[in-house]
Image (cartoon, rainbow, N blue to C red):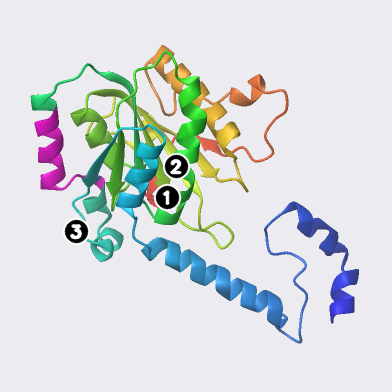
Amino acid sequence: MNDSLDKDPWNALRQFTQARIALGRAGNGLPTAPLLAFNLAHAQARDAVHQPLDANALHEALRAHGFESLDVHSAAPDREHYLRRPDLGRRLSDESRAALLKRQAHAPTQPSDVLFVIADGLSAFAASKQAVPLLQAIYPKLTDWTIGPVVVARQARVALGDEIGELLNARIVVMLIGERPGLSSPDSLGIYITYAPKTGCSDAQRNCISNVRPEGLDYPQAAHKLHYLLTQARALRLTGVGLKDDSDALLTSTPAMPAVSSDADSDSTAG
């Protein structure tokens, strides 16, 4: 069987993709090795959905890199409610809402140009692994922007960023959220950009950059796309279907894996 697999002309293509190709066949099924690899990937994807976000470790990592951070929680009290009740993940808990209101009342700040929210979404693993390196890549590009504190949100869906941005007086909110794990990508991060965030914004009012991870859209490429969309959003005063991503035209070489949409279906990822 090994000799037949080595001679399979598809084998040469496996170096270019993580897709499951050239797996071979044992009778009417898969050989043992690719079958075990598939089962492992499936287990890793399930684990990524259920793994809790280590918020304390994330706050420590943010502080270590010089980022001010805040902590919030959605109205979903635990992971089971989060998965069964997506609506609860789209609004803040009473305690978190009160804490943000109290913060603004005691220390009101000028509106920030952009506010970053790191959310567990459907893969806390992705948020923990990818968010801080992405912030390190994008911050040097925002020298002429006022940036609010980084908010860490647990049991969060995409729309939670709208309420957070509204309460903290942000012109644009950027949600960095763990995407629904795939069988080859349990650690993929999604970026959702919303201009003039407020409760009730629709998905058509957002732009999305997906598959942010070293094996997909790497940090420099993601930061380039994000900076372009932020710059255009500030100039046009909008995001969503009215804002198209032409960032690739500014690159000397086009990224191999562009993954941007103008009206993200956030319920299909972590909405």
Q: Nearer the viewer, residue 193 or 104?
A: 104
Q: Dot 3 surroundings within 10 Å: few (below 14), some, or many (20 or more)?
A: some
Q: Is residue 27 left or right of residue 6?
A: left
Kindly check if marks 2 and 1 are in contact, taking CB atoms under 8 A apart as contact. Answer: yes
- Residue 202 belongs to magenta span: no
Residue 264 position (above or below residue 18): above
Q: How many marks?
A: 3
Please name the residue shown 27% across and 24% down the image. 170
Mark 1–mark 3 Cα distance, whole angstroms, equals 20 Å
Q: Nearer the viewer, residue 217 or 260?
A: 217
SS type, badge 2? helix
Instruction: Please state the horizontal and vertical placement of residue 126, each as a whole percent of the image.
Output: 46, 51
**On residue 128, which mark appears?**
1
Residue at mark 2: 131
Residue at mark 3: 77
Q: Main secondary structure of the magenta part?
A: helix
| Amino acid beneath label 2 | Ala
**On residue 177, which mark appears?**
none
Instruction: Please state the horizontal and vertical placement of residue 114, each as a whole percent of the image.
Output: 35, 24
Q: Dot 2 surroundings within 10 Å: few (below 14), some, or many (20 or more)?
A: many
Magenta residue span: 90-103
